[in-house]
Amino acid sequence: MALGDEVLRMERVGKRYPMGDTVVDALVDASFVLSEGEAVAILGPSGSGKSTLMHLLGFLDSPSSGEILFEGRPVAALTERQRARVRAEKIGFVFQAFNLLPRLTVRANVALPLAYLGHPPPDAEARVDRALALVGMSNRAHHKPGELSGGQRQRVAIARALVNEPRILLADEPTGNLDTKTAAAILELFQELNRQGRTIVVVTHSPEIAGHFRRQLHVLDGRVAEKGAAS
Amino acid sequence: MRPLLSGLVNGFAEIWGHKLRSLLTISCVMLGVASLVVTTGFMEGFFDNWETSLQEQGGIEKISSLAQGVKERQAPFAAVSPGLTPADALALAALAPQIAVISPEIEASRPKLSRGARTYDRRRGARVQGVTNAIFEINRFEVASGRMFSDLDMHDHADVIIIGTRVRDALFAPGEEALGALIDVNDRPFRVIGVLRNYERFWGTYNTLDSKNEVAFVPLTTMAAKIQRSDRLSFLNMKAADVTRLRETVDTASNVLAQTHRGIIDFDVRTSEEQLASYASTKAGFVIGGGAIAGISLLVSGIGIMNLMLASINERVREIGIRKAIGATPLDIFSQFVAEAVTLSLLGGLVGVALAVVAIQGLAAVIPPGSAPVLAPSAFVVGFVFSVTSGVLAGIYPAAKAAKLDPIEALRYE
């Protein structure tokens, strides 16, 4: 499958945290490009800096040095409000702990990102239906998350991430809370979504899961390396 | 509008999710609003009543002159003054054009009103006054049936009488015609030529205007010649033609009276201004007091709401993180929590107003005198504004706190 345009570019991005008296370099000089239609695994042990990378990719955090460009525009130039809008329109998040709102129904959870668009789309209902159908959860639309299994919850979370038809789907250990069988099904769902042309980035500590993805970025001690690249 | 609406929906969901906690908070607002509305009701009732009675006494343009003791230095000469007499009324009419109406009045001391076996209960004390037709204008009386006094009545010292409804009810059987009948004043027969309108303003079962029904009027001349046997006036009431020149009118009247009384100041000329001033200052005091009570209730319910919101936000840090991650701006989060606070307080406000309505109706039935609260529309406005304001004010800080949460910290929060 031919890769499309550049979606996101990291230019020598670094992130430092003050921790007590010392300073921790969570990420050092990370540079890479994400293109349209890619399926990328970010692989690293816990504490390697992969979560930091994930937050930077989703504009939840700002780099201490270097530059992140989204669709060719520097993210640093955006206000917090504009960043939230970009997140709402172009980035879908999937979390390890699903992070559904327990008081809302499946349908309301999936519809939630639509409320944060500048203008709610006229086909909002249809979009929610499509997203639920895509993950095979149409028949559970009126259940509360508490009434669903882990795998089903993660499918709902993926539907929520897809409802705005984002340019990138960011998943942080999406199978971490699932048994092997369910995890395999979720991974299969990601691959199916990628075959449909969606750009997917999955953060994981498991080389086995990373093995399902065509491109792998290894993170270790804050340094990012392309798998197979000379390093 | 849309985020506000979804915020309200969210607010209801949160209230439902924490029933007991929400109930306690709503009670705070409810009690605050209810006590505020009832207090406002009491104040409205009280001042409404006072204002009406001020007006029924003749209003601001009324000037009263009545006899008073002379100063010590004039005491040896006091006898040179004829006192307040009908001649004063004539002099004022001729010399003080600022006075539009002059009403000389003689009040009978210990009058006995009777008709056959029926007697007016003296302990209730009907007032029998010798008057001219000016009394109807100045003290706002109206003859409901029959007629007022004629010039001939005045001239002839006619034995005619106009009675209030309480007097009629005491001396006549229900349905019995009073007009044309004879009643006795101190055992002298008078023909009833008029019956006054019935004056009512009820506070529960208590008619605060009843004293206007407990009167009987005879011609001034008749009173002087046949009942009181003296033309000393009890009151000389006047009505200023121009209220804006009240001071000047009072001065003129005083000068004329000083003249007719040969320099002896055995009279006092006063206006309702003092009463009005005391009305105004009392009202101002009540408004300040009421405002302080309102402020304290506002504070208390505000604290309740803020406490709940802070607790709720601490519990929902993760939710805030999720919402931010999927695209909520700080403003979205802020409006969500303010809307939730307003939902809480609005709910409390509505229940509070409902409670106040019940309380006011209950109190109005139990409290008889003119101190029962009334259901004032302003009270509803106050209650509504109050609850929304306390909701918004109490919601701002927690909402701002929520809006400022770092999404990464919030997502990490367990």
Image (tube, coloured by chain):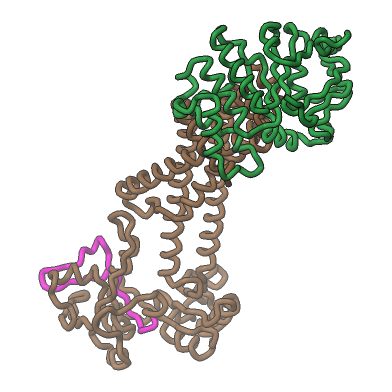
Chain colours: A green, B brown
Q: Is residue B121 magenta?
A: yes
In the rendered image, residue A66, in percent from the top left (x then y), is placed at 88, 24
Who's the residue at 60% across and 38% down the image?
A115
Q: Which percent across, then down, holds residue A165? A: 64, 33
Say which quarter of the image contains residue B258.
Answer: bottom right
Camera-nearest residue between A165 and A80: A165
Residue plotted at (28% across, 81% down): B218
Residue for point 57% across, 42% down: B4
Furthest residue to the front? Answer: A1
Rendered position, A122 above or below A18? below
Q: Residue at x 74, y 28 (%)?
A: A36
- Which range is magenta? B110-134
User: Depth check: B276 or A95 in front?
Assistant: A95
- In the displayed structure, A112 sits above or below B123; it is above
Q: Quadrant of the C terminus of chain B?
A: top right
Asked whether residue B230 appears in the rendered view, the answer is: yes
Residue B136, quarter of picture? bottom left
Label total for image = 0
Q: Position of residue A209 (x, y in %)?
A: 66, 10
Residue A221 falls within the magenta-colored stretch: no
Q: Quadrant of residue A121?
A: top right
